[in-house]
């Protein structure tokens, strides 16, 4: 069987190069949001080494270049992809101004073009406008369905918290919250300490505001900190709860089941059997409600998932391999999974039958009413085919689960289709059936 891998197509097809560029711009924007306010607050620019000035200018040029490139790319809004003029207009209306303001070399401007005074430091914070697009990018990053969605959320969350703490620390330096005369490193560490204790609402009180602007700044930081702290606690709690939501749902189901069984006064062995059944479903992953989980998928995707989930059947019965996709899909849509617990009777001797079973996991015993166990069948084997081959023949024997058994049920219609489509398999089934019947006849004559 050859299944062609189809790649996922996002709303707007973004090439790898664009993706790389987007990541680069986000990293540069975050870097500048950390670097420019810190350097401005620490008054580093006056004595800044040449490489810092060049870095500031280069990153700024890179971000300005990105604005030009934006006009060459398709955009998208809630209604779908946008091209040409529509895309340009959309960019102009949304992020263009924030991008432009955030991309200018504010560090250099504040230290070289604006005279030293009340505005020279705050103005460098204008580079934070570039964070608007970082926010949009991180929202996309978190919302894109991914196996690592919890890790992604945590990363984005940590990034923003760290950024807020850092910026508050820079602001604290700018309002003169740290004693003068310390080196840049010591000043920054003290400011960061103040920022963390304020945001985490710890507030040891060893670094306190002295002037009125410092008091106003501290009050604002406290209000922000209280909100941020609540968000951190709520988000972390929700992420932890989501990390194992499947297990939480399972536990709550077992809790309801326990209450029900106790309420109905079920005998202990039956209660244990029911709980054992659920534990087996959980351990083998068979307990997931496939139907509900997959009902939103497109029919094509649902079929591909069906093929994948039932691939073991093709592996177990090599004669079914090499089938055309359409046949394979018909076969798979005619299969139903079922689980039996040890001791369960799957087939009753003498009853009419319309289903055969494939053993995916576990072992069953074929029990002759007079002679007891005549065969043990395991993974990859099948039973119940005799009643399907001859509709007038009742079930030849009891079939009992020896262990927990995960089986695939095949109905009469699918069985007929399989026999028609796979002549090798049909010949094999008929040969095995003949041997089983002969054995049964032999036993009958011996009694
Ligand atoms: P069916 O008669 O439909 O239901 C009982 C099933 O037990 C039967 O089909 C066979 O698939 C299986 N069976 C009966 N006898 C034997 C045997 N001797 N060895 C293996 N399987 C058997």
Image (tube, rainbow, N blue to C red):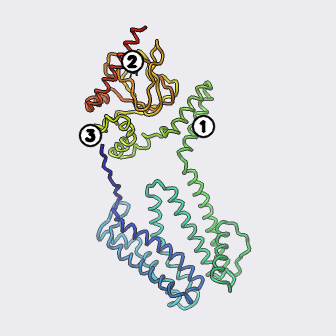
| In the foreground, 223 or 229 | 229
Residue 10 marker:
none
CA neighbours of label 1 inside 10 A, class few (<14), some (14 to 19), many (20+): few
Describe the element under mark 3 as helix, strand or loop: loop
User: Under tag 2, what secondary structure?
Assistant: loop
Tell me the residue that label 2 is attached to. Answer: 395
The quarter in which the C terminus is drawn is top left
Earlier residue among tags 2 and 1: 1
Q: Is residue 324 left or right of residue 276?
A: left
Answer yes or no: disc 2 within 8 Å of ligand 1. yes
Q: Residue at x 56, y 64 (%)?
A: 158
Of the two numbered discs 3 and 1 on the same chain, state the one appearing first in sequence.
1
Q: Quadrant of the N terminus?
A: top left
Ligand 1's quadrant is top left
Task: Tell me if 421 is positioned left or right of 165 in this view.
Answer: left
Per the model, the C-alpha gap separating discs 3 and 1 is 46 Å
Secondary structure state at the residue bearing disc 1: helix
Residue 26 sits in which quadrant?
Answer: bottom left
Say which residue appears at 41% left-offset and 15% top-offset.
Answer: 350
Q: Where is residue 234 shown, x and y percent of the image?
A: 60, 57
According to the picture, the residue beneath numbered tag 3 turns out to be 324
The x, y position of residue 41, in whole percent, is: 59, 82
């Amino acid at each position: 069987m050859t299944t062609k891998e189809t790649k996922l197509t996002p709303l707007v097809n973004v090439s790898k190069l664009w993706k790389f560029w987007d990541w680069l711009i986000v990293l540069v924007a975050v870097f500048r949001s950390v670097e420019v306010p810190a350097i401005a607050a620490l008054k580093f620019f006056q004595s800044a080494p040449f490489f810092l000035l060049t870095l500031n200018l280069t990153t700024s040029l890179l971000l300005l270049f990105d604005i030009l490139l934006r006009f060459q790319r398709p955009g998208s809004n809630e209604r779908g992809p946008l091209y040409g003029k529509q895309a340009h207009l959309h960019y102009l209306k949304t992020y263009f101004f924030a991008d432009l303001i955030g991309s200018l070399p504010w560090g250099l401007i504040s230290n070289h073009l604006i005279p030293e005074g009340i505005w020279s430091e705050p103005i460098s914070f204008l580079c934070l406008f570039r964070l608007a697009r970082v926010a949009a990018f991180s929202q996309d990053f978190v919302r894109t369905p991914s196996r690592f969605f919890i890790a992604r959320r945590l990363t984005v969350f940590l990034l923003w918290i760290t950024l807020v703490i850092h910026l508050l620390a820079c602001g604290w330096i700018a309002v003169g919250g740290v004693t003068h005369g310390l080196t840049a490193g010591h000043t920054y560490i003290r400011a960061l300490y103040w920022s963390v204790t304020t945001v985490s609402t710890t507030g040891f009180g060893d670094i306190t505001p002295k002037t009125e602007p410092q008091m106003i700044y501290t009050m604002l930081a406290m209000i922000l900190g209280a909100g941020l702290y609540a968000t951190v606690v709520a988000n972390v709690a929700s992420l932890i709860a989501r990390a194992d939501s499947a297990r939480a749902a399972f536990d709550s189901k077992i809790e309801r089941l326990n209450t029900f069984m106790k309420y109905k006064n079920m005998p202990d062995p039956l209660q244990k059997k029911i709980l054992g059944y659920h534990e087996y479903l959980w351990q083998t992953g068979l307990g997931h409600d496939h139907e509900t989980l997959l009902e939103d998928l497109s029919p094509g995707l649902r079929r591909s998932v069906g093929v994948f989930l039932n691939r073991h059947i093709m592996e177990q019965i090599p004669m079914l391999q090499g089938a055309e996709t359409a046949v394979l899909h018909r076969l798979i849509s005619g299969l139903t999974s079922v689980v039996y617990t040890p001791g369960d009777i799957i087939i009753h001797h003498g009853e009419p039958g319309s289903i055969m079973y494939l053993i995916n996991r576990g072992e069953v015993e074929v029990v002759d009413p007079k002679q007891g166990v005549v065969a043990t069948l395991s993974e990859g084997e099948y039973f119940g085919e005799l009643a399907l081959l001859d509709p007038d023949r009742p079930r030849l024997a009891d079939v009992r689960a020896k262990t927990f058994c995960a089986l695939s049920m095949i109905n009469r219609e699918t069985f007929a289709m399989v026999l028609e489509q796979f002549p090798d398999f049909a010949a094999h089934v008929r040969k095995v059936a003949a041997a089983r019947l002969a054995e049964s006849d032999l036993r009958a004559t011996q009694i």
